[in-house]
Amino acid sequence: MVLYSAADLIWATRIKGTADQLGVPCRPARDVAMLEARLADSDVRALILDLEAPEPALAMLNRLRGPEASDEERRIRVMAFGPHVAVELFQQARDAGANDVLARGAFDRHLPDLLLQLEARG
């Protein structure tokens, strides 16, 4: 299962629609509470975070990389994306433990391949 947090409906629809076309199980996680629920009921392999909503994105990243995270949760691959000018947010995501940080254009261009790669890792 790939979870995603999107700052707006356009990105949420694009991620979910692409995942559905590929047969990749994908569900939203808008905040830490929703992430906790997904962790409890799903085999989560990856989390995609939209840095256009930095507070919930970084909170979820910190939850998966913080001291309360289990070893299994720490293995969840985290991919963050955002506008190419968000250099400081990109660095914050890397510092917090994101595995991959991409500019929105690269994320958009490679979304199908990225989803397949994220689902394959486990």
Image (cartoon, rainbow, N blue to C red):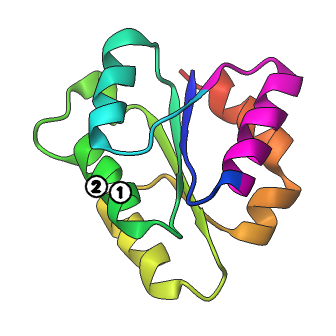
Q: Quadrant of residue 101?
A: bottom right
Q: Residue 110 placed where, x, y %?
A: 84, 52
Image-based side of 121 in relation to 78, left or right: right
Question: At 47% from the left edge and 22% from the top edge, which residue is drawn?
Answer: 44
Taking the magenta stretch, the answer to whether it contains residue 22 is: yes
Type of the residue with mark 1: Pro
Label 2: state its secondary structure.
helix
Element type at marker 1?
Answer: helix
Q: Residues within 10 Å of mark 1 (few under 14, many from 20)?
A: many
Prevalent SS, magenta region: helix
Q: Which sits in the foreground, 63 or 72?
A: 63
Q: Residue furthest front?
A: 9
In this rendering, the answer to whether 104 lies above or below 66 is below
Range drawn in magenta: 10-26
Q: Is residue 118 above or below residue 57?
A: above
Estimate the spatial distance between the alpha carbons at disc 2 and disc 1, rounded to whole Å.
5 Å
Q: Residues within 10 Å of mark 2 (few under 14, many from 20)?
A: some
Q: Which residue is mark 1?
A: 56
Image coords of residue 7 (percent x, y): 56, 60
Residue 4 location, x and y as percent? 55, 41
Whether residue 46 sits left or right of residue 89 in the image: it is right
Quarter of the image where one finds residue 17: top right
